Amino acid sequence: MELQSWLLYHLVAVSDCNQVIQSAATGGELYPVTGTSKMPSEVDAATAPASTGSRARDLGLRAQKKLLDRFAASAAGRSLLIDDTTASLLDNLYRLMDRAARASPRIDKKQPEKVLKNIVKLSIKIGLLHRNQQLGPSDAGNLEEIRRALHSTAMVVLSFYELEFSYERAYLVKSLERCRAAVRALIKPHLTEKSRERCEQVFDFLVHPDFLEAVFANDSELRPVLGALVGDINKALETGEL
């Protein structure tokens, strides 16, 4: 989409701090900013909410109790929500990744789940940095570059979907790599090495030739799922979120 481009940008809540989503398991911690210890890396099954039927929303809501306990004294913990458009977009992205992985012997079948979780984890961390005013003036350029790169990638994905035989892998990879570089530059001064590794893992999957070919090939069996994802992108464009 800039498939991921937009996705990652929207998730990190650069454009709207109130749409930051919650992390399921928050490993790869933020550097402490309030004198507290690291955030929990696991959530007890007993405290996890019942399934909502949406994998993305479940990942976001599963950490609600412990996150709110940790940040009970601040507004940050009480406003970590996942909106319907983002939940749908994430679910459709997961479906694309999962089906592509099942069809390719060169893609680890466990990677789609990891990618989804890593997007959620990175989102919450960047969102908390934003809410705790840990992003300074020097980060403004990186945020704007992320915005431009995500928008550009989204338009590329829309074009490839709508125009037959228009897919060019090198062009899409270049756009995704632009997004990777912008996100990498933003998080490097603020997050741990583990979080930076999560960023690399997300984009490594998104630019994998087998994944992109499975999604954008002219005879792709995943075109209906891609169409659903494109619908989510269009909704974001219509509402001005992208």
Image (tube, rainbow, N blue to C red):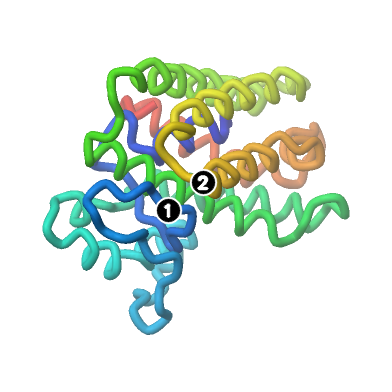
The residue under label 1 is 29
- Labels 2 and 1 touching (C-beta < 8 A): yes
Place of residue 69 in the rendered image (x, y in percent of width and height, measured from the top left): 22, 67
Place of residue 17 in the rendered image (x, y in percent of width and height, measured from the top left): 26, 37
Quadrant where the N terminus lies? top right
Place of residue 113 in the rendered image (x, y in percent of width and height, measured from the top left): 61, 59
Q: Residue furthest front?
A: 35
Q: Residue furthest right?
A: 105
Near-viewer residue (27 or 6): 27
Query: What residue sits 18% from the left and 56% below the top?
Result: 78
Q: Quadrant of residue 139?
A: top left
Category of crowding for the residue at label 2, using alpha-carbon neighbours closer than 10 angstroms: few (below 14), some (14–19), many (at least 20): many
| Residue type at tag 1 | Glu
First reached walking from the N terminus: tag 2 or tag 1: 1
Q: Secondary structure at mark 1?
A: loop
> Which label is found at residue 2?
none
The residue under label 2 is 195
User: In 3D space, how far apart are the residues under numbered discs 2 and 1 (Cα atoms)?
Assistant: 7 Å
Q: How many marks?
A: 2
